[in-house]
Image: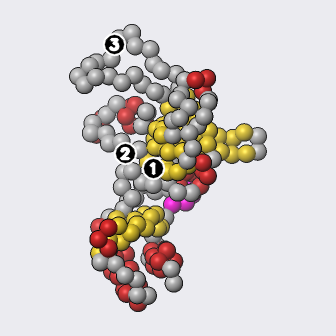
Amino acid sequence: MALQDIVEQTVTGLGYELVEIERCAGGLLRITIDLPWTPQHATTQFVNVEDCEKVNRQLQFALEVDGVEYRRLEISSPGIDRPLHGEKDFERFAGAVIDITLKAPMGSAANGQVNARRKKFRGVLERTQVGDAAGWQLVWRDELKLKPGQKPGKNRVLAPLQALGFELHELREARLAPIVNFKGRGGSEEAAQGEP
């Protein structure tokens, strides 16, 4: 049985979702798991240490039975920069700030406001509807870069919002943007909403 099948069968059998399998240097086998998500039962629960231990014990047994070679097994949660793989992940994180990398440069678009060779973008993920076809777009604002310690001027004009429509097969990689708000619950509304 293939490694993907063994791991997926074990992880889903325990009630979790398989996010990623990585074979790393030194014989490390890294498995990333998450709690299952459905639009009807959207929760904000996270994978904890006990979940990882439970999957680790069961996977060690399953991998040994099937003779899979590895030196170390690591089970972890997806973290704050969780990879997004399929339509279900995009539905789950619609409205979140994400980072995408295109397989090919975007070419000439956005009236020359965006470099035609650009492949990497960070913005808010939104669902689009054009006629009967549903798709995805990323909305962002390219802010002026300030030098360390420099404060924005009072008369600063905000850059215009831009949008990039894409299909999932055009992406090389998509991840949640690792944005941490150290201001806590009382932080700014902009930080809480994840505005780029």
In this view, 146 is above or below 22: above
Residue marked by disc 2:
178
Q: Main secondary structure of the magenta part?
A: helix
Q: Which residues are magenta?
A: 37-41
Can residue 60 be seen in the rendering of this structure? yes
Residue 175 is labelled as 1
- State the residue in front, 32 or 49: 32
Residue 59, x across and y down, in percent: 38, 80
The kind of residue on which mark 2 rests is Pro
- State the residue in front, 156 or 30: 30
The kind of residue on which mark 1 rests is Arg
Seen from this angle, which residue lies furthest bottom?
Answer: 65
Residue 152, x across and y down, in percent: 33, 17
Image marks 2 and 1: residues in contact by CB distance under 8 Å? yes
Residue 153 is labelled as 3
Secondary structure under the numbered disc 3 in the rendered image: loop
Q: CA distance from mark 1 to mark 3?
A: 32 Å
